[in-house]
Amino acid sequence: MSTPAPYPVRVEASLDPALSRWLWLVKWLLVIPHYVVLAFLWLAFGILTIVAFFAILITGRYPRSIFDFNVGVLRWSWRVHYYAYAALGTDQYPPFTLADIPEYPARLQVDYPEHLSRGLVLVKWWLLAIPQYIIVGLFVGGGIWYAWGDRTGNFDWAAGGLVGILVFVAGVILLFTGSYPRPVFDFVLGMDRWVVRVAAYAALMTDAYPPFRMDLGGRDPAGPLPGHPAADEPGPRHQWTGGRITSVVAGAVLALISMGLLTGGATVLWADRSDRDADGFLTASNTFSTSGYALTTEPVVLTGAVPPANVVGDVRVRAESLDPAQAVFLGIAPSASVDRYLAGVSYATVNDVSSRVQTVHSGIQPPAPPQDAGIWTAQAAGTGTQTVSWPMRSGDWTVVVMHANGAPGLDVRAEVGATAPALGQIAGGFLAAGVVVLAGGVALIAVPIHRASRQPQLQ
């Protein structure tokens, strides 16, 4: 029989000869500290992979310092999940490090590619890898999210699929017999190895397509990893210290925050520039119905800490009956006054303009005619579209729509708008903050990558 061709992603593991019968029942708790750290490491992994994508597209090379970091994240994840529920193959607690630990029973190495295809980088991680993702999904129950790290960044590939089922079976057998069935171990390691190969390929670390081959057992077909790869392999050494790793992770977090700030600022700026009507109002409208006597808004609370006129500006409310012959009343009043006016009255409060969600208030007595209530700060009544505008000021305010004659049953179209003069300034603030935070994140990522890529001075 011919020897399988070695793949540049090498995964190996050795089964502990004396595993605890019960420890696997609580390993989910013991690995929580690792999952917390890995959540941040996988965030950095994703951002650095995007950087590597553009570097490969332009230069045809994967930046070596980024490559070493990402391989370290894969290595760390492989150790944690070999200890936990991707294999349950050891009771030795995983070390908190990106480095290779020859003494640990689970090891991973990815050969550094001197050159990568600029064309393949555009399609291999999604189009070409689709058949592999389908297989990985069967193995781990989550497709590429489990191969790259799930949505929480925990690389928890044993949450489902064939790997999870077989590992659970092995755990039950271990609990009752004290022995891990070797055929199950060999098959689980074959699937784990497949998953890691696909993960490395999807992360752009190699152009070699993962083989459709199940390499069973803990020993990789490429042969055992050397005991001290840093000493055995020629070439520059790239140093990832704890401080540099922390800096990259912090930079990735800041970059993620900056994306939220920039997206929010751009959205607000777009609304400020394109969503205003001819009179300069930003508006929202919908149709509403109720069998009660009135429709109200939830109380709008404006404090004096920030002058409402600077933020909200002028407010305009419009309402018209869907029956053109029906007169409507539109009024704005302090919320406490509205509550007293509608006490014991059946009416509805609009909770969400877009979805028309309402809270129904039960009651039996009809209200007094709205124009006789004497509570309104601004009001309008009549057929057709009724409009109320007034400069907003501090207080608790409620908008009320009723029939002008106080009759029950409303079918109206309502619109609320505000000039929001400070919206452009708010958008500018978000964008400026996003740029500053992004610059800080880039610096926290770029500096340690540069320093990690420098060759150490020979003594």
Image (tube, helix red, strand yellow):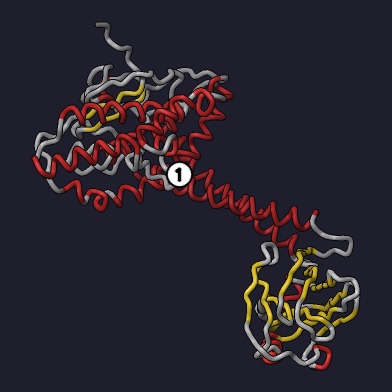
**Which quarter of the rendered picture does the C terminus lie within?**
top left
In this rendering, the answer to whether 110 lies above or below 369 is above
* Residue 455, x across and y down, in percent: 39, 28
Mark 1 residue type: Leu
Relative to 342, is 4 on the left or the right? left
The image quarter containing residue 402 is bottom right
**Which residue is found at the position 57% from the left and 25% from the top?**
122
Residue 248 at least partly seen: no
The image quarter containing residue 373 is bottom right
Relative to 98, is 375 on the left or the right? right
Give the residue number, with chain letter if any, for mark 1.
43
Which residue is the extreme one toward the top? Answer: 1
* Residue 138, x across and y down, in percent: 38, 32
**Which quarter of the rendered picture does the N terminus lie within?**
top left
**Which residue is found at the position 70% from the left and 66% from the top?**
353
* Residue 3, x across and y down, in percent: 27, 9
**Which residue is found at the position 36% from the left and 30% from the top?**
195
The image quarter containing residue 200 is top left
